[in-house]
Amino acid sequence: QVQLVESGGGLVQAGGSLRLSCVASGRTFTSFAMGWFRHRPGNRREFVSAIRWNGGSTYYSDSVNGRFTISIDNAKNTVYLQMNSLKPEDTAIYYCASEAKGPIVTMMRGECDYWGQGTQVTVSS
């Protein structure tokens, strides 16, 4: 079992920045990758970004590429999502996810083994 706890959400003006954190506990040594998803009002949950547990490869959706940066601190079992140049359309509940086996395309489809409880990000115009 892997437990995921997100933090760092909040209210920010358009153009601002936030950094989300996700602390993983439990059987983290079996993780293949960690990632972030979001659920915007009126939309389905969507992939945002992912990173291999060893930090070797990163992946981004087109909508956030160039604005968001994912990183991982294995010593702290923590994955981060640095969000810059935020837009009102980034408003969503952001969820951390963990995938045990891969491949990465499976994770990007949302077929993840573990999920956090979510953290709200609100971007005002």
Image: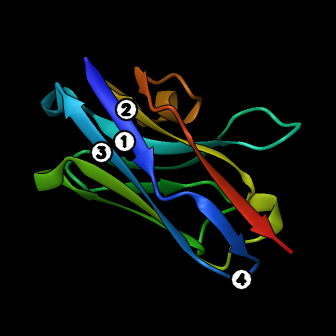
Q: Earlier in the sequence, mark 3 or mark 1?
A: 3
Say whether marks 1 and 2 touch (CB < 8 Å).
yes
Q: Earlier in the sequence, mark 3 or mark 2?
A: 3
**Whole-number angstrom distance, CA of label 4 to CA of label 2:** 29 Å
SS for dot 4: loop
Disc nearest the viewer among 3 and 1 = 3
Residue to which mark 4 is pinned: 15
Q: Earlier in the sequence, mark 4 or mark 2?
A: 4
**Whole-number angstrom distance, CA of label 3 to CA of label 4:** 26 Å
What is the three-letter code of the residue carrying label 2?
Answer: Ser
SS for dot 3: strand
Residue to which mark 1 is pinned: 34
Say whether marks 3 and 4 touch (CB < 8 Å).
no
Say whether marks 3 and 1 touch (CB < 8 Å).
no
Q: In this view, does 78 lie to the left or right of 17?
A: left
**Whole-number angstrom distance, CA of label 3 to CA of label 1:** 11 Å
Q: Which of marks 4 and 1 is nearer the N terminus?
A: 4
Residue 76 in percent (x, y) is at 16, 53
**Whole-number angstrom distance, CA of label 1 to CA of label 2:** 5 Å
What is the three-letter code of the residue carrying label 1?
Answer: Met
Q: Is residue 35 above or below residue 102?
A: below
SS for dot 2: strand
What is the three-letter code of the residue carrying label 3?
Answer: Val
Disc nearest the viewer among 4 and 1 = 4
Q: Earlier in the sequence, mark 3 or mark 4?
A: 4
One can see residue 89 in this view: yes
Residue 89 in percent (x, y) is at 81, 60
Residue to which mark 2 is pinned: 98
Q: In this view, does 68 lie to the left or right of 46?
A: left
Q: In this view, does 10 lie to the left or right of 24?
A: right
What is the three-letter code of the residue carrying label 4?
Answer: Gly
Residue to which mark 3 is pinned: 23
